Amino acid sequence: MNTRIDVFISRKSQDAHYAKELYDHLCAQGLNVFESDESLPKLGNSDYRNAIDDALDACKHLIVVGSSIDNIRSEWVEHEWGSYLNEKLAGRKKGNVLTIITGNLSIAELPLSLRSHQVFFFSRSNFEKIYAYVEDKKVLAAKEAQRQKEIAEAHKREDQARLRAITEEERKAREQSEIAETRAHEEQRQKEIAEAEIRAREEQRQRELAAAAKAQEEQRQKEIAEAEIRAREEQHQRELAVAAKAQEEQRQKEIAEAEIRAREEQHQRELAVAAKAQEEQRQKEIAEAETRAREEQRQRELAAAAKTQEEQRQKEIAEAQRNVEHLRKEGRKNSNGGTTALYITIVVAVIVLGMCILIWVNDRKRDQYYDSSNTMTPATYGDSTTTTTADPAIGEDCIKTLPVMNDNGGYNEAVYSPDGKYIASCIAFKHPNAFTLWDAVTGERVRTYTSEFGVYQCVFFPSGMFMLSGNENKPMIVWDVTTGEINRTFTGVSRNALKVAMNAYHNVFATISDYKTLKLWNFESGKCLHTIEAASKWDILSVAISPDGKYVLTGADNGELQLRDIATGNVVYTLVGHKEGAAWSVCFNSSGTVFASGSGKEVKLWDHLSGNCLATFDHDGLLNNVKFIYQDKYLLSSSGTGSDPVLKLWSIADKRCIHTFEGHRDMICSIDYDPATGHAITASHDGTVKIWNVGQYLDTGH
């Protein structure tokens, strides 16, 4: 390349728009500028590397444009400014090296070799300064001389025009006068130029002093602000420590009060049980006395009936014998008496035999009547030992059962809205009613969300206006509760999102895909923060996020629990307390100080800070759900197998089961609780969602 280039602009493709704006300004000033996107197509050279090297060799000045240190240190850009600096060190280049920075890039981040030359912030107000650095001073002087020459020629042409209009004498007189005026004007102009230069230098010095003072003041304000932030953080930590201490003291006080109440309740229950047992024994003795009295009465009645029957039978036999004797006497008078007598004897015998059979049949019927009456009598007279099992889905425990909405299987999830007015249910199969909203009071269906795929799990946002769902072979979806429309989707979940946990207050949620992959997401940006793959042998079955949004807890099918830091994705600790089953469910209490896990046939409570096991409850069934309720004083757990689908209520202070709720015919898949009504809901594979009156068994202080 033989053409001399005034300026070579080096930049990465991400900063092309900055370079283009500077390129246009310098070209408008008459400079020959090389910028790859603008210059290479004009050169028509397909070998871009050689064309760029030729341009770099032919250029006089170099300008580096960058918005980040990664862009400035990229391979091509570093090659260009590094080559120019090497040429300058070798004495083959005499021009200037300028660096134009923008964005959040600071001068301190620049390489030393660029930082030691002139650096400007990208701004149109700095373009003239940049132009002054790359324009030759001799050229500037020549341009100024040319401009002055053109001005003088213009004045001269004007003078000639005026001179032609006046006489020679007038022309000479005016010429002398104008020469004097011109000289005076020129002297005045030179004086003004000198004064302007002095003022410009003074203004530049003042600007530099002001910039230095401003930078110093900004640094001082920054240090003051950092000190204030540190002070506030320290104060916040002290307040948190005081609050935590007060909370712990209150918790210990509540535990002590709960233990006192529990002992009193236990004493009252023992007294009630003893009184009930005593009453049952008394009722049993009364029932047995009544039974004996009825049996004696029955025996007397049987004996009297048998005696009356025997007397009647003897009377009938005697009458039959008299009739036979009478017939014999009559038969002897008849010539055919022998045959007739035999015939009459047979007839009488048959009659007597029939009467005996009839009497025996009547005896059997009477015995059966008294036997059946004896069996029914205790229930009729209110025997206290007889118990009747009511329909477990009807009564004080189960308030309402939502209708079956799925012909191919049961519900996979049911959750309350934050205000407790609605219940959202979902089915993990492709079905027209896979995602439904119900009225929590009436049990009527409010809305069905159009979904051509199964929905594994759904979670309400704190406002109650939106829901997040994990779906079958589909991305995560945010639904508008009011309209039923899809508000937003999250891509990147390559497989079925079987489990979802969310902390909307801290802008984070977690998903488990096909029990193999755990992903942590930033809700606002939609970006995946971390991806954790399950160990080759073990699946990830359950997930929960701490109330402060800092930790995520997972359970695996080997019973192992892992606590991770959400910011880093690193494991804080691993717990192996479960030995007999998969950890199908984990949850934090409302303060985040304790979490629960369900595995096999046991529920365990753990201290979040130390990881120590605080308590173990035996559920007597394979667990798949646990949930803290009512000020974290109670815990709900449910069974996951079809043979024992029950919901259990536990007192954490007493470490015992308070009540067992029965009514589902198949596996219970989810639990949720509404603190305003004291109602709990369960979704089951039997195709129903049931609402339970859990609050009647809670000690609420009322």
Image (tube, rainbow, N blue to C red):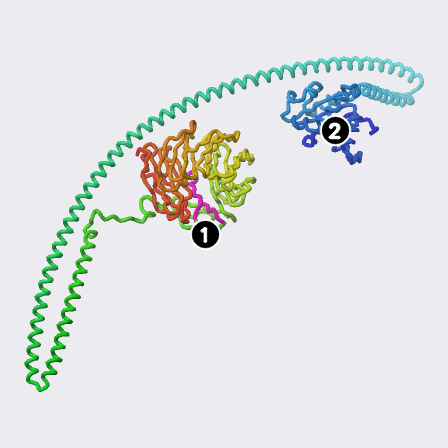
Q: Residue at x 68, y 19 (%)?
A: 112
Q: Which amino acid does label 2 sit on?
A: Tyr
Q: Name the residue under label 2.
A: 23
Which-is-in-front pick, marks 1 and 2?
A: 1
Image location (x, y in percent) of residue 689: 40, 46
Q: Which amino acid does label 1 sit on?
A: Asn
For mark 1, give the secondary structure: loop
Magenta highlight on residue 446: no
Specify which label sits upstream in the sequence, 1 or 2: 2
The magenta stretch is 410-429
Q: Distance between the residues labelled 1 and 2?
A: 68 Å
Image location (x, y in percent) of residue 350: 15, 74
Image location (x, y in percent) of residue 321: 7, 74
Q: Mark 1 points at which residue?
A: 408
Give the vertical position of 691 relative to 142 (above or below): below
Farthest residue toward the right?
A: 168
Quarter occupied by the C terminus: top left
For mark 2, give the secondary structure: helix
Q: Which residue is drawn at 48% across and 34% down?
A: 503
Give the vertical position of 289 relative to 93 (above or below): below
- The foreground one among 307 and 148 is 307
Quarter occupied by the N terminus: top right
Image location (x, y in percent) of residue 53: 77, 29
Give the vertical position of 675 relative to 169 (above or below): below
Magenta highlight on residue 423: yes
